[in-house]
Amino acid sequence: MDISAVSAYLKSCRKAKSLTQLDVAEKMGVTPQAVSKWERGESLPDISLLTDLAKLYGISVESILSGNEKKDISLDNIGETLNAFVSEELFELIKNDFETAESIWNLTVTPDVFLFITNNQKIQLLEIIFTMPDYAVIIDDILPYLNNSQRQKLMRHILDCKDYDNIEPIMPYLSKLVKTEIVVELLENDAFGFLEEIMPLLSSDHRDMLIAHILNNDYDLDILDNFYSFFDKKQRHIISGLYETGGNECE
């Protein structure tokens, strides 16, 4: 970032709006001295002020950060270009990179791009990622940048595709309600092996669901042996009772 270019640009924007440094200071909730320092290149506006400052001057945040310098946008300089703001033009390049890549390994951009894009843009990229055969490769990297609904969308895709081996990484990010949906899905598909892998991330209620499912569907009780270490004292007592009665009672 060229600080001298930014300061000169801020000064020209203020004058274009016929505002004094005192006017800007009052509207932005800062001192006139702070505005003066911005325009002399001695400091930069706090990042929390950029959006309001851009609105005041009728410009974009991107133009402030670049000092209104026009740069050729390409994926080669994406790390420099992102800078906490993704224009529609840049996003189209990013989106095209995902659309034309035959696999996750062929992407030019890195998963960190999810840190800089909007929720709507994340949804667009997720839809493309879901069409890629090795989409699971990127799950761990993008999870921290997704919100709850986006994580649920990802989980729904995993369940629909029955890619159960990709469930574990996302489990810590999910609500109990969504975890219950996953348990139901795994039980209905007899995916006990995958259920065992995520058992440490489930609640006592989920383990009760497992016991009830085995009992109500006449499964071999030996299946529960694989989960025994995860059960609490009460659940172990129930299981012992099932063995004694042959599964006919749950006392």
Image (tube, helix red, strand yellow):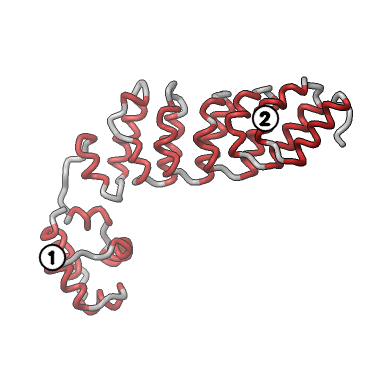
Q: Is residue 170 left or right of residue 84?
A: right
Type of amino acid under label 1 = Gly
Q: Nearer the viewer, residue 30 or 236?
A: 236
The residue that appears at 43% across and 37% down in the rendered structure is 124
Res 96 → quadrant: top left
Look at mark 2 in the image and give the residue it sits on.
Answer: 227
Residue 169 vs residue 14, the one in the foreground: 169
Secondary structure at numbered mark 2: helix
Kindly report which numbered mark, 1 or 2, lies closer to the viewer in this rendering: 2
Q: Is residue 185 above or below residue 65?
A: above
x 79%, y 32%: residue: 239
For image coordinates 88% across by 27% down, the residue present is: 245
Dot 1: element: loop
Pinpoint residue 241: horizontal percent, then vertical percent: 84, 32
- Compute the Cα span from label 1 to label 2: 64 Å
Look at label 2 and name its amino acid.
Phe
Image point (20%, 72%), residue name: 35
Whether the residues at callouts 1 and 2 have beta carbons within 8 Å, the answer is no
